[in-house]
Image (tube, grey):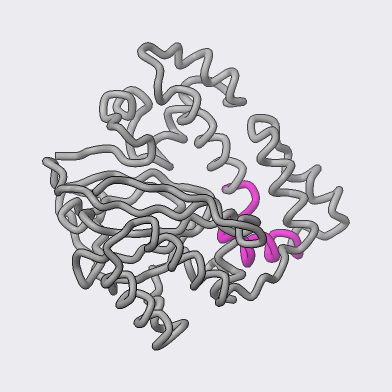
Amino acid sequence: MGHLVAVPAPPLDALVSRLWDWDMPPATHHYERVLPQPGAGLIINLHEDETRVYSDDAERRCTRASASVIGGPCLRSQIIDTAEQVRVMGVVFHPGGAHALTGEDHGVLIERDINLEDIFGASAHHLRERLLDTPCATQRLALLEQWLQAHMRMPRLAPEVDYALDEIGRRPQVARIGALVRETGLSDYRFGRLFRRQVGMGPKRYARLIRFRSVVDAVYRSARVDWSAVAADGGYGDQAHLVREFHDFAGMTPSAFMAARGPYPNHLPLD
């Protein structure tokens, strides 16, 4: 039992950030808040025959999907049920990477989780069956990587999108989308449409998410945080601007985030 993470071999590593396998006892808390990431994800539940996501309100309305789903990237945090997070596997794609697997417009992936069998039919069903019959986590990850290698169409991102992702990733706190678009030679409309199709959100939203993620990475392990300094270093207008971004992406204030931290930076335990 445990949590195992693997980076795939080339050429898959250009599209997939990491593969992971989670085989752990049930958590003591019922829900977890999962922070948004810039890439789409694939989830394969090996403990239950479904996946569940809950609304971020007092009612906790449940949306159920199949045991193998692909979706995202998410525009804001999600609430998940820890009861199903006992034996589960997943794939975290680089921004735009899921397009190489599904051929889907990333806008579709953001709207809802898609049953993997709706895209790949019996092949996806047989993958989960084989994973269920594989007791070793290392072997499960190898099997999942082989399946991805066989199904990736390997289209490359448009060079204009690839350039923008690189520029935003290097300096999210100072990214100026207008200047980036001019450098690509495309119109605002054409670039925005192309970026949303391949990445799943507009370039401005993406830059905001990357900037938020850089702040989370910077403060996660800190005992005390000077939020005014963090806001200034992160390229925010002021601390209030940073607080609004935390509300939008994480559904909570920065101080509430720090108080809710658990052992994993993307997962915040809830009652």
Q: Along the line of sight, which residue is nearer the eye, 2 or 177?
A: 2
Identify the residue at horizontal 45%, vertical 16% (top origin). Answer: 227
Name the one closer to the observer, 211 or 142: 142
For the view shown, which residue lies furthest in the left direction?
28
- Quadrant of the rendered image containing residue 248: top left
**Left-right relation of 7 to 43:** right
Viewed as shown, does residue 141 lie left or right of 103?
Answer: left
State the extent of the magenta-drawn residues as a range.
190-205
Q: Residue at x 65, y 56 (%)?
A: 14
Q: Does 153 lie within the magenta span?
A: no
Query: Residue 250's spot in the image, x, y percent?
Result: 38, 40
Q: Where is 261 relative to 29, above or below?
A: above
Residue 193: give x, y in percent of width and height. Answer: 68, 65
How many numbered callouts? Answer: 0
Q: Position of residue 206 (x, y in %)?
A: 59, 48
Q: Nearer the viewer, residue 248 or 120?
A: 120
- Quadrant containing the C terminus is top left
193 is within the stretch colored magenta: yes
With respect to residue 172, does 16 lie above or below?
A: below
The quarter of the picture where residue 123 lies is bottom left
User: Taken as a whole, is the magenta stretch helix, strand or loop?
Assistant: helix
Residue shown at the point (30%, 29%) measured from the top left: 261
Q: Please give the name of the residue rendered at 30% of the width and 77% of the height, measured from the top-left corner.
A: 129
Where residue 153 sits: x, y (%)?
A: 64, 75
